[in-house]
Amino acid sequence: MDALSCKVYNTNLSDLCHRRTFSPPALVCNRKYVFSFNGSHGQFSLHLNASTDKFKMNGKPNFQLPVQERRLLGKTFSFMGDCALEENFPGVRMNTSQEKIGVLLLNLGGPEKLHDVQPFLFNLFSDPDIIRLPRLFQFLQRPLAQLVSVLRAPKSKEGYVAIGGGSPLRRITDEQACTLKEALKEKKVNANVYVAMRYWHPFTEEAIHQIKTDNVTKLVVLPLYPQFSISTSGSSIKLLMRIFREDAHFAQLPISIIESWYQREGYIKSMADLIENELSNFANPQEVMIFFSAHGVPVSYVEDAGDPYRDQMEDCINVIMDELKSRGIGNPHTLAYQSRVGPVQWLKPYTDEVLVELGQQGVKSLLAVPISFVSEHIETLEEIDMEYKHLALESGIENWGRVPALGCTSSFISDLADAVIEALPTASLVSSSAKDTSSETDTDPLRYVINLFFGSILAFVLLLTPKFISTFRNFLVYLM
């Protein structure tokens, strides 16, 4: 057949809108379009009603046209088939209501000034996922948190004074959020990135309020903890779920939560890059002990509550060491856990004890790797860089090095952006039927009165026992 010339009228698709649903994209267009064809086989015009997908033809060509396919792909309107447009054809202009993507970064938070330390600690120890009390004693959570925070604040302040008077965690997390936003933009995804701290500003509730204000239509939740623990990612996600269930606005918001990402290739390679770079600073890199130090959790979290943290941590280190071995780096390595609080048993081995043992074994060169942290804060800047370094040197280790936290390392941030993009298609609505047992206990007045009455009697009895008095005294001594 001869080529046809085609003129398209009324092609301003300003009324075209793109609604994202869980089914294929629904597009609504209320305009009508007229396609006029001129060819050696005749003239005819095609009237298309975009809202109903119906058309009618004025005039009749003297040949059978092949079926023309009209496709609506995302924001694109295309007329498929052999068609020669006029040279000055301006193209199809569209004004669409775009999907608003939000990314919520979860982190611990930290006091920015010294007078923030005690209230920060109160928020921390008020969390039942940090200090886990038996159900009968949960009414004592806040009074105990107040006591612990007041007793521990002076010692904690000394640590923050040593690193400049406050935690840099918020500043670094804000920088990571900005860098992640740019990385997503480079990957053709426009998103707003929000920061939600669990125990200090900006609190989770503040971030959620901003997400509502910005009318986000799809949300990806990304904890800045590579490995999952009920005391870190779990606590923040539990709080989020409670907020989502209590606010009808979030009943229609598709949400995807990335619970852990320690196994991602970008993260593993970024960590291996940092380790390899720091090893090169030693006179004899092949003799250096690679010392992974992770934040600890009580043993009961793993053995009684089923926390996968220890398994994920060990798996993470094995994968990192496999990556290093693939680069010809076969240094010995070990794992220990730091930052334990109170007289309860935490995951072993303990960092301070292992450092002494390594010195006694004749290890002379050691590279500390903070494996559960992606940002510098008091546990890296003060606990590792000062306390543990001093202990290591005292114990006979002569050459000390420390791998920096990932921070805004480009390969790491790019991988986080990929994780967000991969999570977007899995976003779904939060089920309102799922129960939150922790909030149920707090809101049932009858249960609270019963627990208060019997718990007070039992607490009074326990307070009179010599064993409890001795344990509590040791706890206070440890805190101070």
Image (spheres, helix red, strand yellow):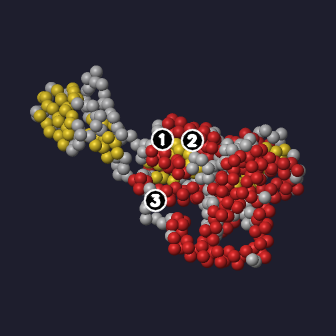
Say which amino acid is labelled 3: Arg
Q: Position of residue 128 (x, y in %)?
A: 61, 63
Q: Secondary structure at mark 1?
A: strand
Q: Are marks 3 and 1 in contact (CB under 8 Å)?
A: no
Which of the two residues, 461 or 440, is positioned nearer the viewer here? 461
Query: Is residue 139 toward the left or the right of residue 104 in the image?
Result: right
Q: Are marks 2 and 3 in contact (CB under 8 Å)?
A: no
Say which amino acid is labelled 1: Ala
Instruction: Find disc 2 in the rendering and name its residue.
Output: 177
Query: Is residue 345 toward the left or the right of residue 23 in the image?
Result: right
Q: Say whether residue 268 is visible.
A: no
Which label's residue is closer to the chain start, 2 or 3? 2
- Identified at 47% across, 46% down, the residue is 211
Which label's residue is closer to the chain start, 3 or 1? 1
Q: Say whether residue 295 is visible.
A: yes
- Identified at 74% across, 56% down, the residue is 152
Q: Secondary structure at mark 2?
A: helix
For marks 3 and 1, give the CA distance.
Answer: 24 Å
Which label's residue is closer to the chain start, 2 or 1? 2
Q: Position of residue 354 (x, y in %)?
A: 81, 57
Q: Position of residue 341 (x, y in %)?
A: 73, 60
Instruction: Find disc 1 in the rendering and name its residue.
Output: 191
Q: Position of residue 130 (x, y in %)?
A: 65, 61
Find the residue positioned furthest to the top. Answer: 88
- Give the quarter of the figure containing the C terminus: bottom right
Say which amino acid is labelled 2: Ala
Check residue 245 in the rendering and tell me which mark sits there, or answer none.
3
Mark 2 or 3: in front is 3
Q: Secondary structure at mark 3?
A: helix
